[in-house]
Image (tube, rainbow, N blue to C red):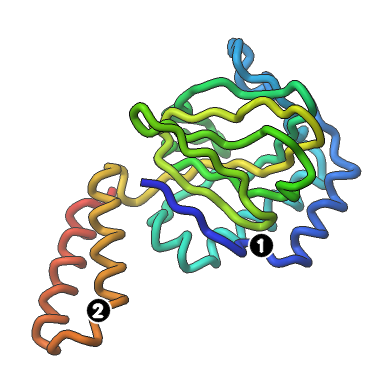
Amino acid sequence: MFLHVKNVLSKAEIDQIRELVKTVKFVDGRVSNPDSEIKKNEQADIRDPSQTLASRMVENALKKNEEAAAFMFLKRMAPPLLARYEPGMTYGAHADAPFMTVQNAPLRADISCTVFIGDPASYQGGELCIHLGSEEVLIKGEPGSAILYPSTTLHEVKPVTSGQRLVLITFIESNIPDQTDRELLYTLNEVYALEGLKMSWDNRSRLQFVISSLHRKWAR
């Protein structure tokens, strides 16, 4: 299951990040995956002050967004990182690493997230391609939107043929580590939010009991 959330960032925040990008130092994207033969992009130098500011803006926006929060069951988040794709750049099909080091401690990547900054009309190609069995889902999000999906999902970035693809990427360690458990709990919460007021108080309370019990049982 994946979730496309619109308007994670405001127009003012998008404009501010685009200004910050003008001063960011970008390095070879393989600095974070030196053995990769399929990663051909650029990412911001994590020591760059403009990268740090953009990262904090996106992290705060994701945490404040109710739709994203309901999906993530957030425990920890890796600092969002600016990534840039120029013509000819791509990232072949892969699943994300299960663990990464954040603040000298391992972070388990349960959910991957891409936040779109560039206008999709400003570049050709560069679609985020999510593989679902034999099918491919191609996504070019509007500026300020985010796509969240299990980090075990096979995905890729199609080659950019013209223009520039600009995004921030991050990884979430969820309080509900099992993907199926997380989807079930997310769905139950959605049903409760949409239908709860139509139920009798007794049935509403029973549904909340189930949700709370499962959350407590599955949380790690």
The kind of residue on which mark 1 rests is: Leu
In x, y percent, where is residue 116? 66, 49
**Dot 2: few (<14), some (14–19), or many (≥20) neighbours within 10 Å?**
few
Number of marks drawn: 2
Q: Amino acid at mark 2?
A: Glu
At horizontal 44% and vertical 43% (from top left) the residue drawn is: 149
Instruction: Tell me the element at label 1.
Output: loop
Choose mark 2 or mark 1, whichever is in front: 2
Q: Secondary structure at mark 2?
A: helix
Measuring from the top left, give residue 12's x and y in whole percent: 78, 67
Q: Quadrant of residue 99?
A: top left
What residue is drawn where x is 66% and y is 62%?
9
Relative to 99, say whether 2 is above or below.
Answer: below
149 left or right of 186 in image: right
Circle on res. 9: 1
Q: Position of residue 145 (x, y in %)?
A: 61, 56
As displayed, is residue 147 above or below residue 25? below
Instruction: Name the side, left or right, on which 102 lies relative to 108.
Output: right
Q: Nearer the viewer, residue 109 or 187?
A: 187
**Residue holding disc 2:** 195
Counting residues from the N terminus, which is met first, the one under dot 2 or under dot 1? Answer: 1
Q: Say if 205 sits above or below 107 in the image.
A: below
Residue 203 image position (x, y, % from top left):
10, 81
Residue that appears at 55% across and 67% down: 64
Q: Label 2 to label 1, Cα distance in Å?
A: 29 Å
Q: Looking at the image, do the residues carrying marks 2 and 1 touch, with CB atoms under 8 Å apart? A: no
Is 174 positioned to the left or the right of 213 in the image?
right
* Left-right relation of 154 to 64: left
